[in-house]
Amino acid sequence: MKSKLTLFAFLLPPLAALYWETSFAAVTHKAHEHGAGKLNLIVEGNKLTAQFEIPSESIYGFEHEPHNAAEKQQRTAGGEKLKSKIAEMIVLDSKLNCKFKLTQLNLHAEEADETESTPITKGITKTHSKSSADHSETHAEFVAECSSPLAGTKVHFGFSKFFPEIREVNVQVLSGEKQLGIDVKNNKGEVSL
Ligand SMILES: [Zn+2]
């Protein structure tokens, strides 16, 4: 009995990684919709993990591999903007003194495939098949370290202030026992962590 439990605990992946994978698996049945993103907010004490995925068109205006230097520059700029504005897009209570750090960024992630049933693995950087050549997504993960626990605090949003093409973001919160989701349309709405 004891050894079984130990083994189970050992096999259990970190919460954030598990949530990331299962949430991607859940959307694999549907092709992406331009302007519509997904955001997972995972609260663990003073730490928030934010996983954001959005069709790349909303971040840098196109979804193919850059054809020239100008497009390459445009893509890089989109990524930089996302990185620098995240605290104004995911607006946490200022009393928490949270500091966001980018932990993963893929500006050309493969679009969720309709026929694919296995979860997309974490940290895809180069995989891109011909079947989704016309579409790609931007996947970013941020970790915010705060001075006090996040549970119970409110979050509001400012995605389209910086990326006007983002119309709607489905926000999923995982905080202790609590799990909830809301659709944030044009930055409207707030969610309690
Ligand atoms: Zn697309």
Image: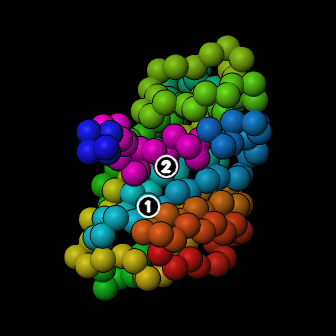
Determine which of the numbered discs, if any, sits on residue 176 in the image: none
| Kind of residue at badge 1 | Ile
The quadrant where residue 115 appears: top right
The quadrant where residue 46 appears: bottom left
- Left or right position of 171 against 85: right
Cα–Cα gap, marks 1 and 2: 8 Å
* Neighbourhood count class around disc 2 (C-alpha, 10 Å): few under 14, some 14–19, many 20 upward: some
Along the polypeptide, which appears first: circle 1 or circle 2? 2
Farthest residue in the front direction? 1
Residue 78 falls inside the magenta stretch: no
Q: Which residues are magenta?
A: 6-24
| Kind of residue at badge 2 | Tyr
Mark 2 = which residue?
A: 19
Residue 14 falls inside the magenta stretch: yes
The foreground one among 191 and 37 is 191
Q: Is mark 1 within 8 Å of ligand 1?
A: no
- Left or right position of 133 against 103: right
The foreground one among 183 and 69 is 183
Mark 1 = which residue?
A: 42
Q: Is residue 121 visible?
A: yes
- Left or right position of 111 against 148: right
Residue 75 place in picture, x, y as percent: 51, 36
